Image (spheres, rainbow, N blue to C red):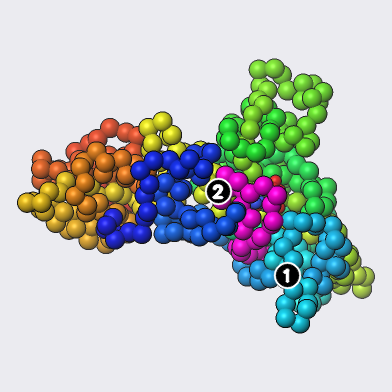
Amino acid sequence: MLLSKLFIPILKNNPSEAKIKSHQLMLRVGMIKQASAGIYSWLPLGFKVMKKIEEIVRQEQNKIGAQEILMPTIQSSEIWKESGRYEDYGEEMLRIKDRQNREMLYGPTNEEQVTEIFRSSLKSYKSLPQLLYHIQWKFRDEIRPRFGIMRGREFYMKDAYSFDVSDEEAFYSYNKFFLSYLRTFKRLSLTAIPMAADTGPIGGNLSHEFIILADTGESKIFTDKRIFDLNSNDTKLEKNSLQQMRKKYEQYYSVTDEKFSKEEFEKVVSEENRLITKGIEVGHIFYFGDKYSKAMGASVDLPGGKKDFVKMGSYGIGVSRLVGAIIEAKYDNKNEIMKWPLSVAPYDLALVPMINKNDSSALEKAINMYKELVKNNIDSLIDDTEENFSSKIKKMNLIGAPYQIIIGKKSDNDLLEFKEIGKETENLPLTKIIEIIKKQKNLN
Ligand code: ATP
Ligand code: MG
């Protein structure tokens, strides 16, 4: 891709209306464009990053055996009246009337819709467990939309739903999602900590929020620092292994302010391990048993002729919020360098040829390299403008390709000035550069 042809309305300075770095950067490099309060268009750069995040989320859902579906954004009020949430949900729900005067709504979440699908399709315990998910836009008429796409009114969410025959089986499903969330956030190069949480309007009694640390986060958190040393690398997708993994995390105190108790915190966490800070909620999982299945009559036949309501959980990841969360975690505000993890970077590599009016040989070199890179599945962006070197580098640092090649007068075709963002420049041949990038991509 040539930078001159990329739809990327870059601003010279940080826009004054943006208060946090992710919002500033996203407006500055034209990743998004506000349409109205809390509602955004996604421009090529932002859309590309979000799609890459979505794909990682999807792969990790598939790995635990969840099946992808797609439910509509617009729902009928009928099912929400059955669950009792039509009245309860309040002003955050956007209510619409169609031309027949039927009450519709723009879905803020999909427990009712998926329960309706389940109850009319499956009748036997033999079909369980079922893990269904979709990745779809949601609308919540937030009272204070802010920080760009971090707290939007329209936002993109992965929400999954589990259906099981008993509590024990349902906890197994819950733990599968717990693991898949740890794996997902790791692939996004984020440290997301599971924290015991309140269930809010979703209901139920078991719940974890996945939170990444950030000063600009809206969640206040209280944790035992030792939780940051844990990982889920050895966890297998079977009952005991998953249960042990969750226990390992739950042994350390880790809650948001809704669940915080000063007395307990000080009792169970020694002073040197206490951490009180702020974070961004990127995922939230709930177990709520038969709350919806009972209200909406979703039951299955059990062995022996009895019937029971299915046990359900729901599992959300804020896909659009993650774009901002990654920026909050990775943007070096002082030096204005965005360090996208390679797994979601808008481009793998930036090619920066030094061009002037009389000499386009560096650009020709870049275009030849580009062809070679395409063959190797390396997505690169060529700065084909005639701007001076330092403003070219400045711009590429904001766009944030993890690797750069500078093509100047000095560089011949064999040895190129190659740089991994944040590290020293090296002189390497293109074949070696391709090898390095491919190796990193395979690790992701
Ligand atoms: P919050 O506490 O941030 O309002 P929530 O608890 O209401 O979120 P959930 O219903 O748990 O949200 O939604 C699942 C995920 O969707 C959240 O973990 C978050 O990442 C994302 N999300 C929720 N509300 C928004 C929003 N207004 N804008 C962007 N993402 C959101
Ligand atoms: Mg939540």
What is the crowding at mark 1: few (fewer than 14 residues within 10 Å), some, or many (at least 20)? some
Q: In this orientation, which residue lies closer to the viewer: 36 or 367?
A: 36
Indicate left or right for 21 with 289 as reference: left
Kindly identify which residue carries mark 2.
148
Residue at 10% x, 45% y is: 412
Residue 48 occupies quadrant: bottom left
| Three-letter code, disc 1 | Ile
Kindly identify which residue carries mark 1.
96
Query: Is residue 174 rendered magenta in the image?
Result: no
| Three-letter code, disc 2 | Gly
Q: Secondary structure at mark 2?
A: helix
Query: Is residue 134 rendered magenta in the image?
Result: yes
Residue 319 occupies quadrant: bottom right
The region drawn magenta spans 125-154
Q: Residue furthest left?
A: 358
Where does residue 242 sit, x and y in percent of width and height? 68, 47
Residue 69 occupies quadrant: bottom right
Where does residue 196 sit, x and y in percent of width and height? 74, 40
Residue at 80% x, 52% y is: 201
Which quadrant is the N terminus positioned in?
bottom left
Query: 394 above or below 44?
Result: above
Query: 218 above or below 125?
Result: above
